[in-house]
Image (cartoon, rainbow, N blue to C red):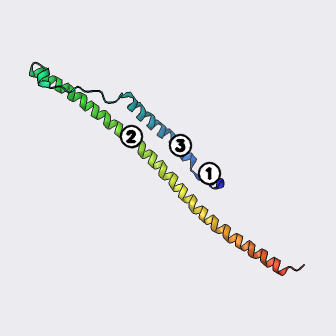
Amino acid sequence: MAIGWFSVLQAVPWGQVIDNAPKVVDGAKKLWSTVSKKSGLEEVEIVDVQSAYSDDAEALSAIRNRLTALEKSAADLHKQMLASSELIKTLADQNAQLIKRIEANRKRMVWLTVVCVVMSAAAIAGLAFVLSNHTI
């Protein structure tokens, strides 16, 4: 069984895997640095704007500030989603390449097994023929 795994590992396009590894690592680092900067959702105090501020101008200003903060937060979340999607796509592409190579190796193993069975049968038939014609 170890020989089977060894042949599979030899057939993996390690050059491509190694070439793509820095891209995956960079994507993961960017994603992690973006996510780790955030301490999670900041607690937003829900305030009745009309009662918290004495005049309408202050209330409107507070609403605008909160809306700006929410829009920035939504934009940051969108960037994180795009980074995550790109990383997932890269990993999926690499996975597809590895699966394609494994499938090719599986077909080669089936072909090799058939050849070995045929060769073994021929060897046994040859040995039986030689032993049946050989008299001591």
Q: Could you give the CA–CA distance between mark 3 and mark 2, rounded to whole angstroms?
A: 20 Å
> Amino acid type of disc 1?
Gln
Look at the numbered disc 1 and give the secondary structure of its residue.
helix
- List x then y, in percent, for residue 82: 35, 40
Query: Extreme right residue here?
Result: 136
Q: Is residue 8 above or below residue 123?
A: above
Residue 44 placement: quadrant: top left
State the mark number for residue 19: 3
Image quadrant occupied by the C terminus? bottom right
Q: Are marks 3 and 1 in contact (CB under 8 Å)?
A: no
Q: Which residue is mark 1?
A: 10
Left-right relation of 23 to 75? right
Q: Where is the N terminus found, in terms of image quarters?
A: bottom right
Pinpoint residue 78: horizontal percent, then vertical percent.
31, 37
How much space separates mark 3 and mark 1, taking CA atoms?
A: 17 Å
Q: Which residue is mark 2?
A: 84
Position in image of residue 85 (x %, y %):
38, 43
Q: Residue at x 88, y 80 (%)?
A: 135
Q: What kind of residue is marked 2?
A: Ser
Which three-letter amino acid code belongs to the residue tagged 3? Asp
For label 3, the SS is: helix
Report the front residue among 96 and 135.
Answer: 135
